[in-house]
Image (cartoon, rainbow, N blue to C red):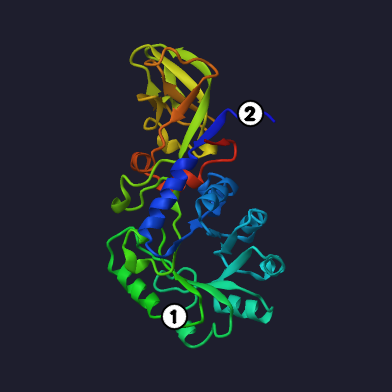
């Protein structure tokens, strides 16, 4: 197997520390982990392995394909997008995963097929997925083996009145529908306080080093650092431009490293002239326009760097989000398939 000229340095200890911090904030509630979108881009199997070893017992994916990829991981998985007609054969034939039923039609489909344990999503104000609270109180779920009744906060990352309204609407369902547990809070929801934790929390983005709300600032640790190999070191003389459309011109003779990284890898064009590589504590600016597979970095301050060496890209999620205009979610889930993912 050929080693890639791109790699993600992934910090297992930081991932586990983030989960333990969120579990502590969850109080007596169990703390699960959202590992959809291939573990937010880091690799779901390894994320599950590390968190399961740390004590996590509840994992959440979006689709049945994601659930099947974890079939031999030895963990319980909830499939957030429910069960379509096309999913039924797989859903009925698996023992490690259960659907999160999201509509009256899905509830009926699962019941009529004799499906076993399931979770159910209730829409308390987001108007995305979920049955109505009135469906629960009217008995739609009666007799169904519901493990977890869920809802999802629309504005947990803001100080919004909707948060309390959703919490109260959800709390009013306690004891209805026969569910064993109730779950509302995502990463930001955990930070809203114990009234939002219920029986099970479902953190996602904060596990991976993001800071979705100020209350978590300084409490999460960076998990992922992209690194790119230098394909060529060259001199751009004063007056020469670098990259497409000549958006950057050297004012003095400038040493430039061309690295194997671009927007096809999730390092998008918004990093042009804004991104930074790091050599220890030394900042090396991205210059010119980021292209599909190549990015130019000013390495005049690092004379020791040569072809074949590696550069770490600055990827502190809240900082880089503010710099690029991308959400912390986009920064993670956009990381492409060409990286070797290396845990340490």
For label 2, the crowd category at 10 Å Cα-Cα, with few meaning under 14, some 14 to 19 and many 20 or more, is few
Left or right: residue 142 versus residue 219 is right
Residue visible at 56% across and 65% down in the picture: 81
> Measured from the top left, where is residue 242 in percent x and y?
44, 21
> Measured from the top left, where is residue 236 in percent x and y?
43, 14
* Picture quadrant where residue 87 is located: bottom right
* Picture quadrant where residue 172 is located: bottom left
For label 1, the crowd category at 10 Å Cα-Cα, with few meaning under 14, some 14 to 19 and many 20 or more, is some
Quadrant location of the N terminus? top right
> Measured from the top left, where is residue 132 in percent x and y?
46, 79
Mark positioned earlier in the residue sequence (1 or 2): 2
Residue 3: numbered disc: 2
Q: Which of 179 and 318 is in front in this view?
A: 179
Q: In this view, does 104 lie above or below 222?
A: below
> Which residue is disc 1 drawn over?
133
Residue visible at 48% across and 14% down in the picture: 234
**Residue 77 visible, this orientation:** yes
């Amino acid at each position: 197997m050929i080693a890639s000229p791109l790699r993600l340095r992934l910090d297992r200890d930081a991932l586990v520390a983030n989960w333990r911090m969120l579990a502590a904030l969850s109080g007596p509630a169990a703390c699960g982990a959202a590992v959809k979108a291939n573990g937010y881009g880091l690799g779901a199997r390894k994320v599950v392995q590390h968190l399961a070893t740390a004590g996590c017992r509840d994992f959440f994916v979006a689709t049945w394909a994601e659930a099947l990829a974890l079939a031999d991981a030895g963990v319980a998985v909830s499939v957030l997008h429910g069960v379509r007609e096309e999913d039924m054969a797989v859903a009925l034939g698996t023992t490690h995963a259960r659907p999160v039923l999201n509509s009256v039609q899905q509830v009926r489909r699962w019941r009529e097929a004799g499906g076993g344990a399931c979770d159910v999503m209730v829409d308390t104000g987001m108007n995305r997925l979920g049955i109505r609270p009135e469906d629960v109180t009217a008995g739609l779920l009666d007799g169904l083996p519901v493990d977890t009744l869920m809802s999802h906060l629309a504005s947990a990352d803001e100080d919004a009145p909707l948060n309390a309204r959703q919490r109260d609407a959800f709390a009013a369902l306690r004891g209805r529908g026969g569910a064993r547990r109730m779950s509302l809070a995502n990463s930001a929801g955990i930070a809203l306080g114990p009234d939002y934790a219920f029986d099970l929390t479902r953190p996602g983005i904060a596990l991976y080093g993001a800071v979705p709300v100020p209350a978590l600032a300084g409490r999460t640790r960076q998990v992922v650092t992209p690194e790119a190999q230098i394909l060529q070191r060259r001199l751009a003389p004063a007056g020469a431009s670098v990259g497409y459309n000549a958006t950057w011109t050297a004012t003095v003779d400038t040493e430039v490293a061309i690295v194997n990284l671009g927007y096809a890898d999730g390092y998008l064009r918004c990093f042009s002239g804004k991104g930074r590589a790091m050599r220890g504590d030394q900042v090396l600016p991205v210059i010119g326009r980021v292209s599909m597979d190549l990015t130019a970095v000013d390495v005049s301050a690092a004379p020791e760097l040569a072809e074949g060496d590696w550069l770490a890209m600055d990827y502190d999620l809240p900082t880089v989000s503010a710099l690029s205009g991308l959400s912390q979610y986009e920064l993670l889930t956009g990381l492409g398939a060409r990286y070797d993912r290396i845990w340490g």
